[in-house]
Amino acid sequence: MNSLLKRFREPIFVLALLTMPFLVFFVRAKKGRDSANFVDRAVLTLIQPAERFITWAAFGTVDAWKGYVALQHVRDENLELRRERLSSFSMQQQAAELRLENDRLKRLLDYTDKELPVRMVPARVIAVGSSPHSHSLRIARGADDGVAKGQAVVSPDGVVGVIAQVTSSYADVQLIVSPLSAIPAVSQRTRGRSTVRGVGDITRCKLEYALRTEDLQEGDLLVTPGGSAFPPGTPVGKVTNVAKKPTGMFLDAQVVPAVDFSRLDEVLVVVHAPPPAPAIPQDVAAGPGTHGSGP
Amino acid sequence: MTLRIVLVIGTCLCLAIAGSVVPFLLHLHAARPDFLLVAVLYLAVHDDVMEGAALSGVAGYLADLTSATPPFLYTFLAVLTFVVLRTVGSGLKTDSGLQAALVAFGTAVGHSLVASAVLGFFTGTGVQLQTGTMLWSAFGTALCAPFVFAILRRLDALFVHVDGPAAGGIR
């Protein structure tokens, strides 16, 4: 037995190395990643600060040149405008969507607003996924900033993706162009619902479950519907290559994402504000012995 | 664990960081090089089977950690790539930079095909083959291959003595 093991030591070792990761991948393939374990966190602690430092140094050098040597005033003004644009993005999107929504809802008497208030955390992009097949970004915000797995990530141009993995100070964002991504969308013009699925191409996605009877046209803007992780009315992309088949329930179309993912420097993480705490009755809030008589 | 193993892991760590940062800083979205795949190729051509397979697994694990994909996909693919390359290894010539680039191009195309198939099949998303992206990425990988090979060769040169390769070194 020992001689056999010794003889086939190499094939057994390699087979084990192949089998173990495959089994874990097979089990977890459809569920996605759990939170990072101890080993993951230890390795990421080495990688993430290094990525952040290199990005900071590179951008710092470029910014220094642009800011102090070339166009100091223009750059300052541009930075200020970008900050303003980021801060007003949420309000603009909500206002635009609310205008359209309001027109429809005026016709309804039993309208109730079920949307939670949203809070957006701006985050700096520090890296992309190291594998060319991965479609992810790494941002310099993590659990310490209230970022959690599954939260939506947007930019002033539109939907970016969702948080896939979080450590204390950093998070990985899975882009909507990833084959693992599928988000709900609604046509801004027709209000027809569909799903935008990534195909692994950074320049386009696939439109799924759009009814063939839908009057979807080239150039129609798709936005996020209410009730998802994304703020309602956030642009997803524009419809292109619409092909209505003579049979079947759904039409074929592609979507050009609203965001240029190769030029993303800053994003916003949508952190839903917690619902207001229930009002505490005054006699409880005041503490024992305030009201009534004690024993 | 020998010093060489530690240094190779350290190099893979640096390559993972480079693979994440360089495409971001240069705004590359198509011709993105896969530095870690080149490291796996180097290990397959130059290393001992057990040590090379284990180090390939480490390289894949690093790619996993920086890719937001289901866990251990790239670990599995890296070891699989190592095994396949090792099997056909005797026919691979990577002595010159051009040879290394050509082999890296072929390896990257094969790796992309298998990655797309495995990811699509096991996640239920269907196989999404992007030929353009795949070829551009393979081109980027081929371009960086001579540099990664040069780094790893230099590292290995530290462990080669006048009277032959050191234990745990090049075989």
Image (cartoon, grey):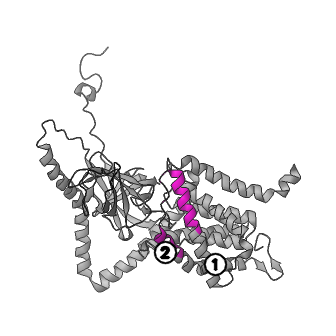
Question: Crowdedness of circle 2 by 10 Å Cα count: few (<14), some, many (20+)?
Answer: some
- Which image quadrant is residue A77 in? bottom left
Question: Crowdedness of circle 1 by 10 Å Cα count: few (<14), some, many (20+)?
Answer: many
Disc marking residue B136: 2
In this view, A284 is above or below B73: above
- Relative to B127, is A83 on the left or the right? left
Residue A208's spot in the image, x, y percent? Answer: 36, 53
Q: Give me the C-alpha separation between circle 1 and circle 2.
A: 20 Å
Q: Describe the element under mark 1 as helix, strand or loop.
A: helix
- Relative to B98, is A34 on the left or the right? left
Question: Callout 1, which amino acid?
Answer: Phe
Give the residue at x 69% y 83%.
B95
Residue B68's spot in the image, x, y percent? Answer: 48, 57
Query: Looking at this view, is A219 or B25 the one in front?
Result: A219
Q: Which chain carries label 2?
A: B
Question: Callout 2, which amino acid?
Answer: Trp
